[in-house]
Amino acid sequence: MFKRHKSLPSKRKREIFSQGATGSTLRNDLRNFHCLSQLVLSAGPVKSAPVSKHSKTAHFEIEILDAQTRKQICIVDKVMQTSTIHDVKQKFHKECPQWYPSQVGLQLEQGGPFLKDYIAIQSIAASSIVTLYFTDLGQQVSWTTVFLAEYTGPLLIYLLFYLRIPYIYDMKESSRRLRHPVVHLACLCHCIHYIRYLLETLFVHKVSAGHTPLKNLIKGCAFYWGFTSWIAYYINHPQYTPPSFGNRQVAVSAINFLICEAGNHFINVILAHPNHTGINACFPSPNYNPFTWMFFLVSCPNYTYEIGSWISFTIMTQTLPVGIFTLLMSIQMSLWAQKKHKIYLKKFSSYMHRKSAMIPFIL
């Protein structure tokens, strides 16, 4: 009994000790939890993961220097990445009103080619600062104005000679000599040719919205108007003699002239189609129209038909001025055709197999 009563206090002590230890552990846990809670509350509400934002669009600074003196003319700032050379010219005009956008020629380096209006600034910028060289292109005119002036002049000039106004030919000789039918036919063909040019310029061709120096208009008008005066003077002269082989030569040439004019028109209509213009253009393909089958043989059939028209007109009238004009036009168009043919070879190599530039199997 004595031992049993003695063991009770010791057991009680152990229970009290274990309870005390448990209580202290609970107090420590509560204290730690309280500290953690205070830490979380002091940190504020839980934030979601930051959402990445797109960086602001970068701006370019365009420094424009004089192409000859390399002196700074102005600085065009706040140019967007999507801006083009055309936009830079507009901003440059606001800074320097004495130069219109059509007069401004911008180069990436001195002596280099002029940058096209559609070129994006981002494509030529190596850093945020872009240096361009300025050249004054002088007085400019639109391409539509150039074409209309070049083609309207020959149409009216030829009619003046055809009417045989008194200041050009001797009236007595003009009234005494009757005109050969080929003179009337030549006037009709000449008018058809230039009326087609004018109508296609207005309604068919996608004429560039750009400009060209005024001197190019003067040179073009001088060439077309001058040759037309020379050609019309000979064909409508009272002493003009008909072709050597008579009506057969005239009829065959006139039919071939009309065929070439029709072919030229249909080719120009195809070339003006949206699929065949612009950066993403595809090479024109022939269709059900027989006049378009020339695409199987040459890459520039519009020049082929154009030269065919003038060769026919030369044979029909049998005059030296027309022959010289046809020769010069053939040389010029062959150069244009070869230049285009090289471009087509790079862009549409699979379509250019065994094709010539302008004359089938020859050129």
Image: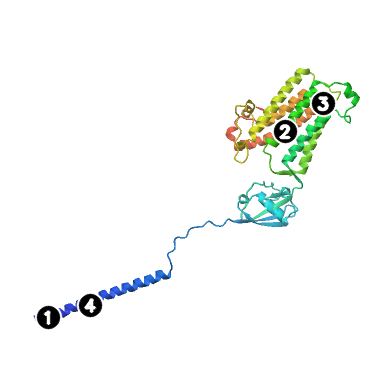
- Residue 184 visible somewhere in the drawing: yes
Q: Quadrant of residue 346?
A: top right
Give the SS element for disc 4: helix
* Residue 243 point in image, percent of width and height: 80, 20
Can you identify the residue that label 2 sits on? 197
Q: Nearer the viewer, mark 2 or mark 3?
A: 2
Q: Is residue 166 above or below residue 63?
A: above
Give the SS element for disc 3: helix
Can you identify the residue that label 1 sits on? 5
Q: Is residue 26 above or below residue 181?
A: below
Q: Which mark is residue 17?
A: 4
Q: Residue at x 12, y 80 (%)?
A: 5
**Three-letter code for the amino acid on which mark 2 is drawn:** Tyr
**Three-letter code for the amino acid on which mark 1 is drawn:** His
Disc 4 packing (10 Å; few <14; some 14–19; many ≥20):
few
Q: Earlier in the sequence, mark 3 or mark 4?
A: 4
**Three-letter code for the amino acid on which mark 3 is drawn:** Ile
The foreground one among 227 and 27 is 27
The foreground one among 75 and 143 is 143
Can you identify the residue that label 3 sits on? 235
In three-dimensional space, the C-alpha distance between marks 3 and 1, rounded to whole angstroms, equals 154 Å
* Residue 40 point in image, percent of width and height: 40, 69
Q: Is residue 159 above or below residue 92?
A: above
Q: Residue at x 72, y 56 (%)?
A: 73
Q: Earlier in the sequence, mark 4 or mark 2?
A: 4
In three-dimensional space, the C-alpha distance between marks 3 and 4, rounded to whole angstroms, equals 136 Å
